[in-house]
Structure formats: C-alpha cells, structure tokens
C-alpha cells in the first residue's frame, strides 16, 4: 500500500469546527428569515436521474455540457450529482402532488451542489447554497417578496457592497422570436465575434452578452435587446415587480444584458453581486421558471426562486470567527477514571457543558488545559471525593460525590 498522504479532491474543502460555526450562522439566519415568510425545509437526494438536469437546466448550457458529475450506477442508470436545486425541488413537487396543497407552496434548502468548474477563490466543485422556491403564483408580489427575502438574508449576514441587477426574459414565445432576431444580427457581424460566440450562435446566442471578448462586446453594445421586445403583459409584470421593490426600499439596476447559465427562466431574472468579491462576484441569483413544473410532467405551475452560495456569502461578509462555546465544567483526575466518568455523566445529565481528561496529562497540565477551554469550573476528582475550583470566584473547596450538581446550582 502506498504511504503517500491523500488530499481532499481539487475544488473541495473540509469544514473544520471554526468554519462550521460560521456556516451554522448562515443556516440559522436563513431558517429564521425564510420560515417567518412561510417557507418549509426541503432536502432532496444528492444525486438524481441525469435527464432531470439535461431537460430543465438545458442541453446547451455550460452546466449540462461541461460541469456535471455524471456516472452510471451498478444498475446501469445514468445519475448526476445535483449541480443545482431548482429542478430537484420541482421534481419533488410533482412527485408528491404538492399542487394539491394551498398555493403558493414555499420551500427552502441548505444543501451542497456539485459542478466540475475550474477551481479558484469562491468557486468550488462542491459548494453549498441556501435556496428558496415559491410555486403556484404569477403575482409580481411574490417575485418582489422572493427578492426582498434574498436581500434580507444577505444583508443580515453582513455581505458587503451588495448590488442587485434585474431583468425580464419575457414569456417563451417572445423569447424565441427575439432569439431569431438576435441570431440574424450576430450572423451579420460574425467576423467581429470571438470563435466561441460564433460557434454558439445557433445553440445559445444569448450567451454572447456574457462574453469578455472586446470585439464581441462592441457587437453586443448595438445588439437588439430582449427587454425592448417584451409583450405588454410581460412588460406590465416587470414594471410591477420594480414598483414593489422600490416600495420595499431595495435598490436595483436594470441590466438588459443579464444572462444566467440556466435555461428554465422566464420573466423576472435577477442576480446579487458583491463588490467585496473578486472575479466570482455572484453571491446569489434566481428568477421565474413558469414552465419548469409542466416540463417535468406536472400541471402548469408558475415558480420563482433564488439560491445564494454559502461560501460566497461568507467571503463577502468577512466576519470574524465566532468564539468556541464556553465550557461549564472540566473534570480533572489522577487515575480515578471511573469516579471522573461518573462525575462527567452526572454533569451532562444536569444539562451542563462538560468534558473530562482522557489523554493522561499531569494534574498541572489538566488545569492548564481547562483554562484553555475556558471552563468556569474544574472538578478535580480523586477516589475519595472532589475538589471544586471556581475560576470566576477564584475559590477551591471539597465536595462529596453526589453533591456536585447541587453545589453548582447553588452558586450564582
Ligand atoms: P446559480 O446562479 O447557478 O443559480 O447559483 C446560485 C449561487 O450559487 C451563485 O450565485 C453562487 O453564489 C453559488 N455558486 C454557483 N456555483 C458555484 C461554485 N462553483 N462554487 C461556489 N459557489 C457557487 C442556481 O443554482 C439556481 N438554481 C438558482 C435558482 C433558484 N433559480 C431559481 N431558483
């Protein structure tokens, strides 16, 4: 057997106790903000049938073309580690007949996702998202509510330099007419486009807005824009969403070039970025997906939602690590293992945060260790009784076995 040490796979990371505490804080605030707005927790499997993503996220997207961890299982089914959460939530909505529940059905998740992307700061191959999905309402108020909730969450977690970009993709019919118009425009300028954009004119012309190639950018500055081609109904819907966001005091910029890497979106589209982040500035994003549930075989059901990356939120918030939880009691002993263990169990049963010595330190070493752990009390256990040290009061006194909890309860 090779003795070479193994490392976590590229683009993944271990969550050690220090960062676990900060991540729990994200989850706690998410739960508080979302449950207060009627969202219930959902967790779906870490892998799904590959088809779920190819049919919804879109065959032509980067995610489906290059980034999925897809594998056959031993039964020969093609499975994929979930690259995102919206399609799985809609799959579960259909599978469990949730359209029979009173609408809107509001669901949130805090889960990990997998994308084979080039690893760099803020971009990982396994990453976590807080996501929120609301199914069953066309009302612009639910778009605005969803966006306000994302904003509240990011704001409460201290994400710095937040910006919100907003657009509308309109309905699928207007979008496909626009697509043809854009393709015609791009074909007419194909000499000035990057190779990649030129190759994708037929498959995914909208991605040209996302290109960082200067020639392409010049062409796109004069390109027709989807926002100018919305039907009156879609334009009204978009206008209402904006009015409600203004009412909520959430600042936004309209960005007609906003593109997101998922095909299921219709109408409202948005993205939060943070100036505190580098190249990977997207902290969270989402939009409407009014055709997704029907595409998965469910009844026509509108939907809107978003997801925010936990690692990016933490990078954008730059909060100091929280202190470790305090310790009530450290049980020190010198070979009186059984009595010490009994004392530990007794303290735990009484609801105290307690630890005992298990590594054979000298008594002096144990006292030092207790101090390092921030223990308020140390019980020095011997065969015939306990010496109780109170660090706050700087006292030490003998206590009989069985009297410790009573004695601790009596101190202020
Ligand atoms: P997304 O924009 O692909 O949307 O991802 C949402 C967020 O996940 C991003 O803004 C980013 O913070 C984080 N994220 C994405 N990829 C990575 C990565 N490789 N490393 C670290 N963080 C990452 C969605 O996934 C949609 N399902 C959002 C949605 C929900 N739309 C409607 N409902």
Image (cartoon, rainbow, N blue to C red):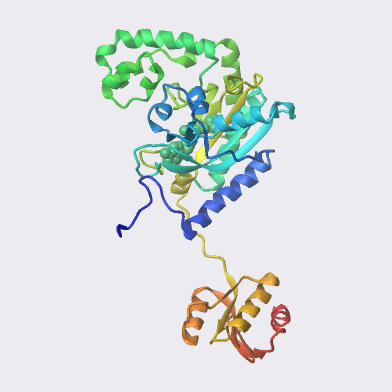
Which residue is at a point 59% across and 45% down the rendered structure image? 30
Q: Quadrant of residue 146 in the image?
A: top right
68 lies above or below 58 = below
Q: Position of residue 137 (x, y in %)?
A: 67, 24
Q: Is residue 274 at least partly visible in the picture?
A: no
189 lies above or below 154 = above
Q: Nearer the viewer, residue 201 or 219?
A: 201
382 lies above or below 27 = below
Q: Quadrant of residue 44 in the image?
A: top right
Residue 179 placement, left or right of 138: left
Farthest left residue?
191
Residue 225 placement, left or right of 172: left
Which residue is at a point 68% across and 42% down the rendered structure image? 36
- Point out the image quarter for the N terminus: bottom left
Q: Position of residue 350 (x, y in %)?
A: 70, 72
Q: Position of residue 326 (x, y in %)?
A: 57, 69
Q: Nearer the viewer, residue 72 or 321?
A: 72
- Point out the image quarter for the C terminus: bottom right
């Amino acid at each position: 057997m090779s003795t070479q040490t193994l490392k976590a796979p590229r683009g993944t990371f271990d969550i050690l106790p220090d960062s676990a505490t900060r991540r729990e804080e994200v989850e706690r605030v998410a739960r508080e903000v979302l449950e207060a707005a009627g969202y219930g927790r959902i967790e779906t499997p870490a892998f799904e049938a590959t088809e779920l993503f190819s049919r919804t996220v879109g065959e032509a997207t980067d995610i489906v073309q290059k980034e999925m961890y897809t594998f056959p299982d031993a039964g020969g089914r093609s499975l994929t580690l979930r690259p995102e959460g919206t399609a799985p939530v809609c799959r579960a909505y259909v599978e469990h007949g949730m359209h029979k529940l009173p609408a809107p059905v509001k669901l949130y998740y805090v889960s990990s996702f997998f994308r084979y992307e080039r690893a760099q700061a803020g971009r990982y191959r396994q990453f976590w998202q807080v996501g929120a999905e609301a199914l069953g309402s066309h009302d612009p108020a639910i778009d605005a509510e969803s966006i306000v909730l994302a904003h509240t969450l990011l704001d409460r977690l201290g994400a710095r330099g937040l910006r919100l970009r907003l657009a509308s993709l309109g309905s699928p019919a207007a979008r496909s007419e626009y697509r043809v118009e854009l393709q015609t425009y791009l074909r007419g300028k194909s000499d000035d486009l990057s190779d990649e954009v030129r190759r994708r004119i037929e498959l995914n012309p909208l991605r040209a807005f996302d290109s960082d190639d200067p020639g392409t950018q010049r062409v796109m500055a004069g390109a027709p824009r989807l926002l100018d081609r919305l039907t009156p109904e879609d334009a009204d819907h978009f206008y209402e969403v904006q009015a409600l966001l203004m009412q909520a005091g959430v600042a936004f910029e309209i960005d007609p070039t906003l593109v997101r890497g998922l095909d299921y979106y219709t109408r409202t589209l948005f993205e939060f970025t943070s100036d505190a982040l580098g190249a990977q500035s997207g902290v969270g994003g989402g939009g409407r997906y009014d055709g997704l549930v029907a595409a998965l075989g469910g009844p026509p059901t509108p939907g809107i939602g978003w997801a925010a990356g936990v690692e990016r939120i933490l990078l954008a918030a730059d909060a100091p690590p929280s202190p470790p939880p305090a310790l009530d009691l450290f049980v020190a002993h010198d070979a009186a293992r059984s009595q010490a263990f009994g004392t530990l169990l007794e303290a735990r049963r009484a609801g105290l945060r307690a630890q005992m010595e298990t590594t054979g330190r000298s008594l002096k070493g144990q006292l030092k260790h207790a101090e390092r752990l921030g223990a308020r009390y140390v019980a020095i256990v011997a065969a015939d009784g306990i010496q109780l040290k109170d660090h706050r009061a700087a006292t030490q006194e003998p206590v009989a076995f069985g009297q410790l909890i009573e004695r601790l309860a009596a101190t202020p």
